[in-house]
Image (tube, helix red, strand yellow):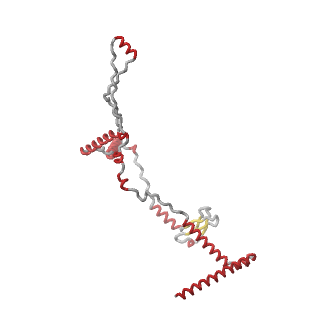
């Protein structure tokens, strides 16, 4: 069996059983190219199957130029008719206008009238003018020259009309506002309600009392903890810092004496309690 490299065309003679029935991967020793090699009879079978299942050749299209003129015209007319039918089918039908019910028309008219009335009510009121109060205009007084001319002609000038008496001046009560009208405008609930607890000034809380107690208590606890820690580590500090040895020994002796005194006090209290019991 002969193998040919598809890359460099190198040829190799191998045994028939070197290639299994299903094929295998081989590599060219000349160029290093690898490919999948099958047996020759399998290649022939694949070629036969490809020939059986090849798609048929396309049919030649009819020559439109060789048709008779009458058939071509009939075909064109049929095509135009089909296009017109399709256009008529696709065209949407015109929408019919629905008749409005009389009740709906009445409601619309009432809404329009109500809107017009509301706009008239919102329009600004016309300016009011002061009508004539029927007062007679005062006659103009005669000038001194006109009075002399009238005296020379012997005509007595008409005396000016007496002034109309004015009304009585308003009294003190009329000048002041009416108390009843003022009371009517006030809210009666204000008098009945009286003064509530919310209207009274609230006492302000004194700040700093709780905070001061907490601060003092924390300070005492901190000092006690520091004293206990110093009592515990006093021997070690005396070894590390010889200069503080005397002070630390005195502090330890003081704490020991305080412990003995407290122990004796507790023993005395316990004895007293047992004796009373």
Q: Front-most of 51 and 84?
A: 84
- Residue 222 picture location, percent across and down: 62, 72
Q: Is 68 on the left-hand or right-hand side of 254?
A: left
Residue 22 to residue 200: above or below? below
Residue 67 to residue 57: above or below? above
Residue 124 to residue 226: above or below? above
Q: Is 75 on the left-hand or right-hand side of 53?
A: left
Q: Do we see residue 161 in this rendering?
A: yes
Q: In this view, which residue lies farthest toward the top?
A: 153
Q: Quadrant of residue 134?
A: top left
- Residue 95 picture location, percent across and down: 30, 44
Task: State the count of labels.
Answer: 0
- Give the residue displayed 62% in from the left and 82% down from the top: 262
Q: Quadrant of residue 26?
A: bottom right
- Residue 41 picture location, percent across and down: 51, 67
Residue 159 to residue 255: above or below? above
Q: Front-most of 273 and 244?
A: 273
Q: In this view, which residue lies farthest toward the right?
A: 243
Q: Front-most of 275 and 6?
A: 275
- Give the residue displayed 40% in from the left and 48% down from the top: 62
- Residue 133 picture location, percent across and down: 31, 30
- Give the residue displayed 34% in from the left and 20% down from the top: 159
Image quadrant holding the N terminus, namely bottom right
């Amino acid at each position: 069996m002969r193998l040919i490299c598809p890359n460099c065309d190198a040829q190799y003679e191998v045994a028939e059983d070197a290639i299994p029935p299903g094929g295998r991967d081989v590599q060219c020793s000349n160029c290093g190219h690898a490919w999948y090699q099958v047996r020759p009879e399998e290649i022939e079978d694949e070629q036969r199957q490809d020939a059986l299942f090849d798609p048929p050749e396309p049919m030649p299209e009819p020559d439109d130029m060789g048709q008779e003129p009458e058939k071509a015209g009939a075909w064109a007319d049929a095509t135009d008719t089909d296009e017109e039918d399709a256009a008529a089918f696709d065209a949407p039908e015109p929408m019919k206008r629905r008749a409005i019910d009389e009740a709906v028309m009445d409601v619309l008219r009432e809404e329009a009238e109500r809107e017009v009335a509301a706009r008239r009510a919102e329009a600004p009121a016309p300016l009011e003018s002061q009508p004539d109060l029927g007062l007679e205009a005062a006659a103009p007084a005669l000038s001194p020259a006109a009075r002399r001319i009238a005296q020379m002609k012997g005509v007595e000038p008409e005396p000016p009309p007496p002034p109309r008496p004015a009304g009585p001046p308003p009294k003190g009560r009329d000048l002041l506002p009416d108390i009843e009208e003022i009371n009517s405008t006030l809210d009666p609930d204000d008098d009945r309600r009286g003064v509530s607890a919310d209207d009274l000034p609230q006492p302000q809380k004194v700040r700093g009392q709780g905070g001061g107690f907490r601060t003092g208590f924390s300070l005492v606890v901190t000092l006690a903890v520091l004293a206990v820690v110093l009592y515990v580590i006093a021997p070690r500090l005396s070894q590390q810092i010889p200069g503080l040895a005397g002070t630390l020994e005195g502090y330890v002796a003081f704490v020991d004496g305080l412990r003995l005194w407290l122990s004796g006090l507790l023993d005395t209290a316990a004895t007293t309690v047992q004796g009373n019991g």
